[in-house]
Amino acid sequence: MASGPDPARARRPEILMVMGVSGSGKSTVAARLAEHLGWAFVDGDSFHSPAHVAKMRAGHPLDDDDRAPWLAAIGTWIDTQLQKREPGVVVCSALRRAYRDALVRGRDAVRIVYLDGDRALIEQRLAARQGHFMPAALLDTQFAILEPPAPEENAIRVRIDAAPAAIVATIAARLDWERGPEQTRDPA
């Protein structure tokens, strides 16, 4: 039996869903990754309703009923990209397995990228961040509900204690390795 990259994982188009707790660098890394790959980019925060943004800004976490239309909107974006056969990168905290399943199950071309970091580093980042609706006070709720991806979810897990460019390079290298030399994009 031959070993190597799974052909189902190597085919395009592909959607990369960058996940992690608030302050893990999802938006920064995902935008740079999309630029590096030449793929479309969307930040899942843009799918939150104004009422839900106000709720979080006031220091109240969203519940599953709040998240359902948000996840559905992200799923619609993913489906549109796949129908157009255009790869993309989407940011979504996707902290629980059920949220990831709602976005990945039945969509074989979606791949999870999990930005994993230490709480102390993330707290420092949140303390320095300005202009974002998610207050640092909600970090406890983020870690309380976080269910890191299980092995069967086949996520690309990347530590966040490097510069964004190095994190992007790590992710891109993993994708290139898994695709094999015949599937990597032309660097020109």
Image (tube, rainbow, N blue to C red):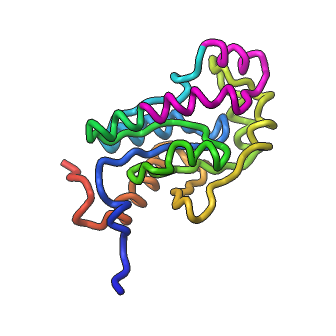
Residue 154 in the image: state x and y as whole percent. Answer: 52, 61
Toward which corner of the image does residue 53 lie, by quadrant?
top right
**Residue 96 as seen in the image, left or right of residue 47:** right
State the count of labels: 0
179, 186: nearer the viewer: 179
Residue 117 in the image: state x and y as whole percent. Answer: 67, 49
Residue 81 in the image: state x and y as whole percent. Answer: 34, 36
Toward which corner of the image does residue 124 lie, by quadrant?
top right
The residue drawn where x is 51% and y is 36% is 91
Residue 127 in the image: state x and y as whole percent. Answer: 73, 28
106, 109: nearer the viewer: 106
Q: Is residue 65 magenta?
A: yes
The residue drawn where x is 66% and y is 18% is 52
Question: Principal SS element in the magenta part?
Answer: helix
In the image, residue 126 sits, relative to residue 57, either above or below, namely: below
Toward which corner of the image does residue 89 lie, by quadrant?
top left
Residue range corresponding to the magenta coloring: 50-76
132, 55: nearer the viewer: 55
Q: Is residue 108 magenta?
A: no
The residue drawn where x is 26% and y is 36% is 84
